[in-house]
């Protein structure tokens, strides 16, 4: 099967260890333990320096693990940067503590990775090819894995040693199953028909110009390596197809189906072997007048199969002793064997069903063979060209022409598209993310983008249209709507605030509702996951403090539709474990312990970071 050139994995922390080779683990970022460059470092942890390319790689990998989700580029870039620092702090700490992982442990782990396996077994050629594509020695890669393993072991030592007591579990369910009594008034979103002034419109336009920009767009040119396209271009001779057929004949063979039954005459204490054999011979004579299944039910010492007429089911080589298997394989349909000796005794064996194996003729599967042969050849070619495409693109970042020449595939072009949608290849989110990445927007070739397991793309910018501010006249109707909505929310909130103050000063909720011509409602025994109230309101009520000295807690919360709810919390009843909860107790205990372990580990990292020698260049 085709080995993926890039694979991503997720865990407690989603991470990628190499640009093309990935390792599923709790920590990511190991690829950053590389040398820097001649430019000034952007940060350092002790003697370890980080450069802009380290951050670019970390950001790219972080963004890949968020594929399918919308995110703020600057926020993710900051998170990637923070992760670089924290991982280096942790690595230096475990090294200072003298924690190590042996070369053998690392090698065994590497052998278990599917990225380096063919048909479930470690493929040394595949391993060297992928490392070679990264210009990395095996020793260097093993060293990186050792760092990742020792960091993960340290993390597990903290997270997996956490535990909770029964008191913790009881407190959890007391909070989880808590009930609250509330009365509430909902203030619907008010309507505003008043037109805003020109000055208000102008001011809003200036303050929110980013919201009124045209979408940033790019057009790209790209070289796409496709397994299907490679397969279509492969010619196969008759000799090659026949050779492939012979080599993979088992794929076109239906195995023989052989079902057997037996009668066992077991070796018993005090009984001679010859006596047992004679019983078997006598039984075979009886079979001339008696049905095999009937006789097996009466006399077989295999009590389990005797109930089923001696039926052993489908015959599977390798399960029984060799003598038994040899005899079973020689029998024809409905034929009964001579007594066969095994460690258990003597057996009479009968074949009750027999469907011979069949080999599909070459001509009947020729089309299937042709397709399989071409795909197999294309997979090898795909891997070779993938390495070439990666190398040449990296070595010639300013043009795709060398890539076209090297792989023999002409570049294609797209029309303009934005960050969130596109047509053709731009409909692929991974392509859009790469097209708008910082490095590509600077004019460089992209890193290879994998689309599934059978397409690899390198792209560069052909045209870039930055986001532009739209004219006020064009967006004026939208601004008027926004100002009216804002005014409506302000008026609604003001009325709700008045009601809240009145309730805090002791006015009853019924009187407040009457004053503002609204309706007061009451819910007793409101649960945390109850559906009586909108979710934001329910959440606000359960986040509120308990009533003190009989004085209710007054809560103000906004719903998604813009309405405001003023609630008076009068009573809180502690929850108890239900029968259903008792069944979930083990899972709850595990999850609480896990959460506690993660919190403890984060605390340890924070402490290590506060003590580390960290320097960050402000710009």
Image: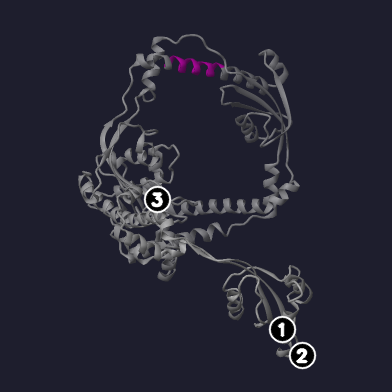
Separation of disc 3 and disc 2 at Cα?
Answer: 67 Å
Taking 285 as reference, is 58 above or below it?
above
Front position in the image: 122 or 54: 122
Q: Please state, as top left, top right, bottom left or bottom right, where the C terminus lies in the image.
A: top left
Report the residue at 42% width, 63% height from top.
Answer: 248
Look at the image and give the residue range highlighted in magenta: 479-491
Q: Which residue appears farthest toward the right when viewing the image? A: 298
Front position in the image: 414 or 587: 414
Q: Are marks 3 and 1 in contact (CB under 8 Å)?
A: no
Q: Please state, as top left, top right, bottom left or bottom right, where the N terminus lies in the image.
A: bottom left
Taking 119 as reference, is 327 above or below it?
below
Instruction: Report whether 416 appears left or right of 346.
Output: left
Q: Identify the mark nearer the N-term, 3 or 2.
A: 2
Q: How is the image coloured?
A: one colour
Dominant SS in magenta: helix
Q: Secondary structure at mark 1?
A: helix
Q: How would you rate the neighbour count of disc 2 (Cα within 10 Å): few for under 14, some for 14-19, many for 20 or more?
A: few
Nearer mark to the viewer, of 3 and 1: 1
Front position in the image: 45 or 64: 64
Q: Where residue 270 is drawn, which disc sits there?
A: 2
Q: Are marks 2 and 1 in contact (CB under 8 Å)?
A: no
Taking 605 as reference, is 326 above or below it?
below
Q: Where residue 453 is drawn, which disc sits there?
A: 3
Is residue 483 visible in this depiction of the protein?
A: yes
Separation of disc 3 and disc 1 at Cα?
Answer: 62 Å
The residue singled out by tag 1 in the image is 281
Q: Identify the mark nearer the N-term, 2 or 1.
A: 2
């Amino acid at each position: 099967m085709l080995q993926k050139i890039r694979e991503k994995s997720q865990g407690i922390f989603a991470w990628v260890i190499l640009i093309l080779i990935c390792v599923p683990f709790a920590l990511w970022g190991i690829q950053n333990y590389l040398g820097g460059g001649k430019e000034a470092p952007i940060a350092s942890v002790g003697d370890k320096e980080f450069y802009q390319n380290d951050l670019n790689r970390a950001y790219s990998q972080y963004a890949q693990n968020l594929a399918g989700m919308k995110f703020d580029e600057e926020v993710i870039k900051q998170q990637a940067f923070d992760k670089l620092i924290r991982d280096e702090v942790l690595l230096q700490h475990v090294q200072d503590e003298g924690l190590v992982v042996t070369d053998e442990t690392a090698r065994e782990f590497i052998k278990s990775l599917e990225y380096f396996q063919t048909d479930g077994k470690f493929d040394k050629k595949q391993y060297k090819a992928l490392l070679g594509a990264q210009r990395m020695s095996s020793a260097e890669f093993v060293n990186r894995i050792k760092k990742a393993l020792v960091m993960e072991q340290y993390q597990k030592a903290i997270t997996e040693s956490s535990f909770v007591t029964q008191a913790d579990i009881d407190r959890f369910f007391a909070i989880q199953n808590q009930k609250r009594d509330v009365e509430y008034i909902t203030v619907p979103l008010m309507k505003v028909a008043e037109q805003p002034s020109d000055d208000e419109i102008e001011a809003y336009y200036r303050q929110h110009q980013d919201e009124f920009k045209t979408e940033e767009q790019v057009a790209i040119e790209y070289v796409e390596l496709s397994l299907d396209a490679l397969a279509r271009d492969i010619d196969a001779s008759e000799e090659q197809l026949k050779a492939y057929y012979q080599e993979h004949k088992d794929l076109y063979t239906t195995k023989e189906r052989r079902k057997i039954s037996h009668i066992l005459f077991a070796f018993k204490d005090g009984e001679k072997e010859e006596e047992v054999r004679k019983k078997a011979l006598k039984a075979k004579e009886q079979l001339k007048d008696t049905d095999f299944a009937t006789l097996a039910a009466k006399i077989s010492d295999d009590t389990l199969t005797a109930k089923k007429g001696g039926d052993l089911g489908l015959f599977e080589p390798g399960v029984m002793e060799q003598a038994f298997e040899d005899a079973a394989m020689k029998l024809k349909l409905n034929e009964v064997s001579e007594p066969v000796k095994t460690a258990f005794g003597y057996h009479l064996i009968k074949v009750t069903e027999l469907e011979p194996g069949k080999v599909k003729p070459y001509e009947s599967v020729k089309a299937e063979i042709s397709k399989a042969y071409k795909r197999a050849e294309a997979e090898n070619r795909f891997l070779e060209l993938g390495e070439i495409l990666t190398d040449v693109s990296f070595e010639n970042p300013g043009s795709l022409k060398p890539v076209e020449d090297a792989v023999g595939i002409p570049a294609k072009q797209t029309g303009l598209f934005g960050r969130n949608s596109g047509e053709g290849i731009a409909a692929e989110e991974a392509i859009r993310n790469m097209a708008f990445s910082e490095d590509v927007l600077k004019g460089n070739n992209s890193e290879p983008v994998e689309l599934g397991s059978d397409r690899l793309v390198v792209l560069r910018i052909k045209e870039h249209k930055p986001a532009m501010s739209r004219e006020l006249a064009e967006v004026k109707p939208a601004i008027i709507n926004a100002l009216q909505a804002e005014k409506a929310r302000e008026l609604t909130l003001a009325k709700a605030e008045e009601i809240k103050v009145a309730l805090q000063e002791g006015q009853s909720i019924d009187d407040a509702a009457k004053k503002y011509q609204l309706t007061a409602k009451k819910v007793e025994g409101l649960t945390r996951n109850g559906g009586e109230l909108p979710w934001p309101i329910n959440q606000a009520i359960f986040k509120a403090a308990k009533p003190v000295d009989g004085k209710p807690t007054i809560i103000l919360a906004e719903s998604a539709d813009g309405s405001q709810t003023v609630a008076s919390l009068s009573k809180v009843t502690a929850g108890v474990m239900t029968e259903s909860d008792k069944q979930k107790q083990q899972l709850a205990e595990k999850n609480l312990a896990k959460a506690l372990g993660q919190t403890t580990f984060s605390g340890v990292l924070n402490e290590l970071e506060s003590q580390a020698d960290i320097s960050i260049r402000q710009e």
